[in-house]
Amino acid sequence: MSLFFQESVALKVEKLTMQFGWFKALTDVSLSIKKNNIFGLIGPNGAGKTTLFNLLTGVYQPTSGSVEAFGKTLLGLKPHEITRRFVARTFQNIRLFKELSVLDNVLISLDHSSTSKYRGILSSMMQFKSYRKTERLHRDRANHLLEIFNLHHRRHRRACDLPYGDQRKLEIVRALATGAKLLLLDEPAAGLNIKETQELMCMVQLIRDQFDLTILLIEHDMKLVMGVCERIAVLDYGCHIAEGTPLEIQKNERVIEAYLGKGAHA
Amino acid sequence: MSRLLAWVLALVFVWIVNNQIHHFIDPYILSIVIFAGINIIFATSLNLISGFTGQFSMGHAGFMAIGAYVSALLSTSFFASFPQLFFVVIFLSGCIAAVFGYIVALPSLRLRGDYLAIVTLGFGEIIRVIILNINSLGGARGMTDIPPLSSFGWVYTGVVAALFMLWRLTRSSQGRAFLAVREDEIAASSMGVPTTHVKLQAFVIGAFLAGVAGSLFAHYLSYLNPQTFDLNKSFEAIIMVVLGGMGSISGSVIAAVFLTVIRELLRPLQDMIGIDLRMILYSLLLILVMILRPKGLLGTKEWIDFVPRWPKKVLRQRRPLHEG
């Protein structure tokens, strides 16, 4: 039973603490996300959500604690090595490769995905048969991914010329193209209108089913979080204050307190 | 088989052109053409580092100096009796320059932007001062009696090889990795691009080509002086890259040719007026271009992006970025 349990956990965070000088951004945060779940992470501004993401993806190294994805530790790894462990992320403030085409944005991820063969300088220069074959495969795959997200007809545009909503989508495509099994989405709906947000919600669920993903989602849009997530964890001042299903979270006293202040009644 | 034949024909063609060209072109003009060729290699090699990978390097003349002096040493010692093996000398000196590129890049790639620029600036100066103080390399007197092996054929074979290499490289998966690092390093590493490794590669290839340019330079002038490879030389390369467009090989080629030629064209003016207006006009021109085209002459586009639509399908393997 315990073995089975181990295997069905995608991400396991234990007692994670991050200290910047005197400031504790995260204090003993523990999370456990089951495979194929859509897991929401909410909290007021400055609660440490993005810090947690940065720790998970190797941008920072935690002061203490452990992070495991699919049974393997992520501690001490560089961001690009973590991508090889099937974990990929999107960014709160969009960080596309702005001057490159939409297709290239996706191809970069595919080139370095956990499943792709290493292609060095020499094969890039001489463009051997195997190189061209991989290139064709990647192009097909990139086109396929872009089609799913309805970006296919814009694949030759520069990424910065896309409308805002499409840029957000492209970030997800790009993360997906790394071959990730665990997707960390940092406020994917920020700045989107209601229609776009709804579209995004469907999209998140769709790719979860289609690509067999586990998704960890930071979001301020409560409607999206409550609608799409199966479990939600709440952070406040770097502490993990609650976890449960959307309904449980909505009723949780401490969560209401964190958002609205003491004595507020929802 | 037809491939082999094509190669042989190309070689014969280069050999004939190489031996006959002085009958058709004035030696002064030929020397300008050759310097333009050397500058093309030099500028495009820096473009790989600064334009494509976005690492601002200000010591590129240092790599050229290493290539020049190493090749001069080689061809006056080991290879003195084998002038036919000039390409080996070029290759070896390129490799030594690449090793130095690796050594410089390894510690300094932890730095970004201005800090990297200062470190590379320091490196360029260190190389120059070291050479200045080595007596066996001629020190400040300069190194003389280098066999004049760089002919039109060698230089332009080098140009074609370098351009081919860079063209293929920048339009491949490797090139996309360079561009990803330039665009956004954090995002690149989050997408699995090993950024430090990629930057190292750019430095090593860039240094290799700068070394090649250096060795061609040394064997054309047959005299080397450390002062040639001072800060101005590095800046010359930077100017060519910026003027042509960061991230455009064709831009660097145009800028390299343009700047080499314009300096010579302005020379008669000096004789007429008697004042050295050359550098003033040269600078003015640069200022004007940067005001009128702040992204450089071609921006990030290549010559192929200016070709009308129908022959494109034949010529290119991938479509350009700015379409649609």
Image (cartoon, coloured by chain):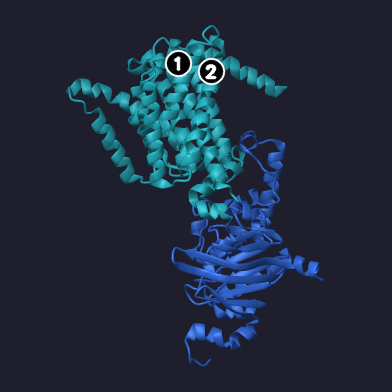
Chain colours: A blue, B cyan
Q: Residue at x 57, y 71 (%)?
A: A28
Q: Position of residue B94 (x, y in %)?
A: 52, 25
Q: Quick one: label 1, few (<14), some, or many (20+) residues within 10 Å?
A: many
Q: Is residue B319 above or below residue A55?
A: above
Drawn side of residue B80 relative to residue B128, left or right: right
Q: Which residue ends up furthest to the right in the rendered image?
A: A1
**Label 1 vs label 2, nearer the camera:** 2
Give the residue at x 54% y 15%. B86
> Disc 1 versus disc 2: distance between alpha carbons?
10 Å
- Residue B160, numbered circle: none
Q: Amino acid at mark 1?
A: His
Chain ID of residue with mark 2: B
In the rendered image, the vertical position of residue B62 relative to residue B299, given as above or below: above
Quarter of the rendering containing residue A122: top right
Does residue A224 sit above or below B40 in this rendering?
below
Residue at coordinates 29% horizontally, 41% vertically from top-left?
B288
Which numbered disc covers residue B219?
A: 1
Q: Position of residue A209 (x, y in %)?
A: 72, 69
Query: Is residue B80 or residue A130 the one in the foreground?
Result: B80
The front one of B37 and B319 is B37
**Secondary structure state at the residue bearing disc 2:** helix
Residue at mark 2: B89
For the residue pair B166 and A256, the one nearer the viewer reads as A256
**The residue under label 2 is which amino acid type?**
Val
In the current view of this chain or complex, which residue is farthest to the top?
B81
**Mark 2 nearby-residue class (10 Å; few <14, some 14–19, many ≥20):** many
* Residue A166 appears in the figure: no
Instruction: Point out the tag, 1 or 2, that comes first from the N-terminus.
Output: 2
Percent from the top left, x then y, of residue A241? Answer: 57, 79
